[in-house]
Image: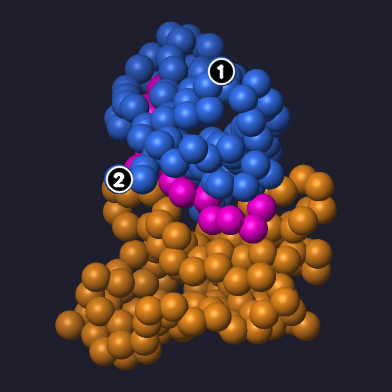
Amino acid sequence: GESVGLHLPTLSVQEGDNSIINCAYSNSASDYFIWYKQESGKGPQFIIDIRSNMDKRQGQRVTVLLNKTVKHLSLQIAATQPGDSAVYFCAAQADTGFQKLVFGTGTRLLVSP
Amino acid sequence: EAQVTQNPRYLITVTGKKLTVTCSQNMNHEYMSWYRQDPGLGLRQIYYSMNVEVTDKGDVPEGYKVSRKEKRNFPLILESPSPNQTSLYFCASSLDPQGFGQPQHFGDGTRLSIL
């Protein structure tokens, strides 16, 4: 079955730096990917998504890159702010008839001033 | 405001005492789902529903029941809770009836402690 993993449990950055959070997935049939942000005491909040027919998608201060060859995606946050401190999850989904969303375990982003 | 609402947010109870966690969404979403979140294990799906009266098991359905009598509500029922069901629970909904290609929107969670 599908598995999704993030490369680092914790990432510490300085305010103003760019942050890169990585994620790997196992199922080559996965064709929809989502990044979520989870702040303490709250549910996962949608950040950005990307389909497998794209390599890159940009939002406000965030960019998701997808490399299907090595089954890897990353979330880039520009000019990281203290309010970006949270746990970030990637999730993958395959359109194979059973549309299960598989989540990684998350990377905690710590932003120091 | 578009949202998924769970109640209660916190509950401490004892083994064997039936409980229900309610979930309601106001976005007219077809797809709803329940997850549990445990340290080191990420989010795991318990049950999901693609429409009224249509529910199916996720990865960890044992010990749980759900119902979908109305589109907006998707309660999670623990008939006889046990300590291994102590966890953080999330309800989510999605516009697409199969939950594909549209982000799932999550409630703020229910922390259950079963003693």
Tell me if residue A102 is in the magenta stretch. no
Q: Secondary structure at mark 2?
A: loop
Judging from the image, mark 2 belongs to the subunit labelled B
Give the residue at mark 2.
B1
Q: Residue furthest left?
A: A113
Give the numbered dot on residue B69.
1
Figure quadrant of residue B103: bottom right
**Image height of A74 relative to B40, above or below:** below
Residue type at tag 2? Glu
Closer to the chain start, of discs 2 and 1, is: 2
Q: Colour of chain A?
A: orange
Which numbered dot is residue B27?
none
Residue B91: image location, x then y, percent: 47, 37
Residue at image point 44% right, 66% down:
A47
Q: What hue represents chain B?
A: blue
Q: x, y percentage for residue A59? A: 44, 78
Q: Secondary structure at mark 1?
A: loop
The quadrant holding residue A45 is: bottom left
State the separation of the CA atoms marked 2 and 1. 23 Å
Chain at tag 1: B
Q: Amino acid at mark 1?
A: Lys
Do the dots labelled 2 and 1 sit on one chain? yes
Q: Residue at x 72, y 48 (%)?
A: A99
Q: Residue at x 23, y 75 (%)?
A: A82
Q: Is residue A87 above or below residue B94?
A: below
Q: Quadrant of the C terminus of chain B?
A: top left
Q: How many marks?
A: 2
B38 sits left or right of A11 in the view: right
Give the residue displayed 49% in from the left and 82% down from the top: A58
Residue segment shown in magenta: B100-114
The location of residue A39, given as percent across then percent down, is 32, 57
- Horizontal relation, residue A2 to residue B40: left or right: right
